[in-house]
Amino acid sequence: MGAYAARRRRPLLGADGRLLIVAADHPARGSLAIGSDSMAMADRYDLLDRLATALRDPRVDGVLGTPDILDDLAALGLLDDKVLVGSMNRGGLRGAEFEMDDRYTGHDVETMVDRGIDFAKTLVRVNLADAGTAPTLEATARAVTAAARAGLPIMLEPFISEWRDGRIVNDLSPDAVISSVAIASGLGADSSRTWMKLPVVDDMERVMAATTMPTLLLGGDGAGDPEAMYASWERALALPGVVGLTVGRNLLYPADGDVAGAVDTAARLVHTTDSVSA
C-alpha cells in the first residue's frame, strides 16, 4: 500500500486527450503463449523488464495489470505519472471447461479506490451456447454499478465467442463486434463511467457508430504482418470516439524483439497532432 500512496499521480487524459496503455494481464488467465512459444510470458523477471522498457517512454500513459503485476511495478517505482488500470476478472482460465464462467478473481472496486488505481477493466465474452456466460454478465453488471458509484472509469472488453474444436474463439466480424458492444453497453445500473475496449476489425466506422462511449482499441494479432497492423491502428485511431490504444503482447513481445521500437511506433500513432480527440 505504501508504494501506491507514494506514487505521483496524473490526470486520466493528457493535453491531447489520448491514451496509450500497455497491457500485461494475460498470465493470470493462464495465457502465456506468444506465437508458437507456449511459455513465452512465463518468466516474470523478463516480463517486468519488458514492462520497464515500455514505461520509461513518457508517451506511454499507463499500464493494465492484475494485482501481482501492478504490485511488482509499484515496488520497483515504475508507476509515477502513469495511469493504472486494474484487471478484474481472470477466472475464465484459458482452455478450461469453465472458461466462459469468467469469475472476478483480480482487482475489486474498493481496493482500487483505496490504492488510487485510476481505471478498471473487465473481459466480457458472450457465448450464447454456454451457460457460463450468464454469471459473467451478472458479475460484470455489478462491477459497472460499483465503479460508477465510486467514480471509477471502467472499460469493458466485449466479444461474441464460441467453442470451436475444444477452445474459445472470438468472432471478429463487424456484426459480431457490434452485437457485443450493444450487450456490454447495457450492463450495470449506471453507464456514466463505462468505456469500451474493442478490437480493430473490418468496417470500423460502422463499429464505432454502435457506441457513444469513449473507446480504446486493443492490439490484435500482429505476428503475420506488423506493418498492416500498424496501418489498421492508424486508420481506426482517426475515428470519432476512439481515445487511444491498449496493447499487450504486440508491444512487449514484438517479432523483432525491439520493445522500445514497437512502443515508439504505437506512441507516434496515438500521440500525433493530427489525431482526432474524443
Image: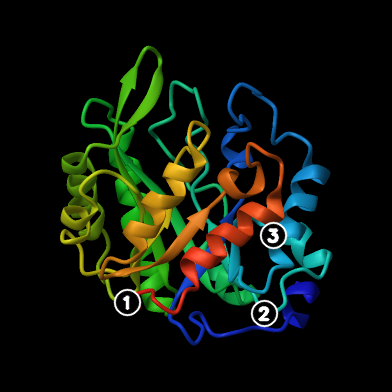
Front disc: 2 or 1: 1
Name the residue carrying label 2: 81
Q: Earlier in the sequence, mark 2 or mark 3?
A: 3
Percent coordinates x, y for residue 207 in the rendering: 20, 53
Q: Secondary structure at mark 2?
A: loop
Depicted 274 relative to depicted 60: above or below: below
Percent coordinates x, y for residue 232 in the rendering: 37, 50
- Residue at 23% of width from left, 37% of height from top? 173
Left or right of 190 in this view: 265: right
Alpha carbon separation for disc pair 2 and 1:
21 Å
- Residue at 51% of width from left, 39% of height from top? 91
Residue 25 at least partly seen: no
Q: In the depicted view, which residue is nearer to us: 61 or 122?
A: 61
Name the residue carrying label 3: 54
The quarter of the picture where residue 56 lies is bottom right
For the C terminus, the image quarter is bottom left
Q: Earlier in the sequence, mark 1 or mark 3?
A: 3
**Amino acid on which the number 3 mark rests in the picture:** Ala
Q: Earlier in the sequence, mark 2 or mark 1?
A: 2
Front disc: 2 or 3: 3
Q: In the depicted view, which residue is nearer to us: 215 or 167?
A: 215
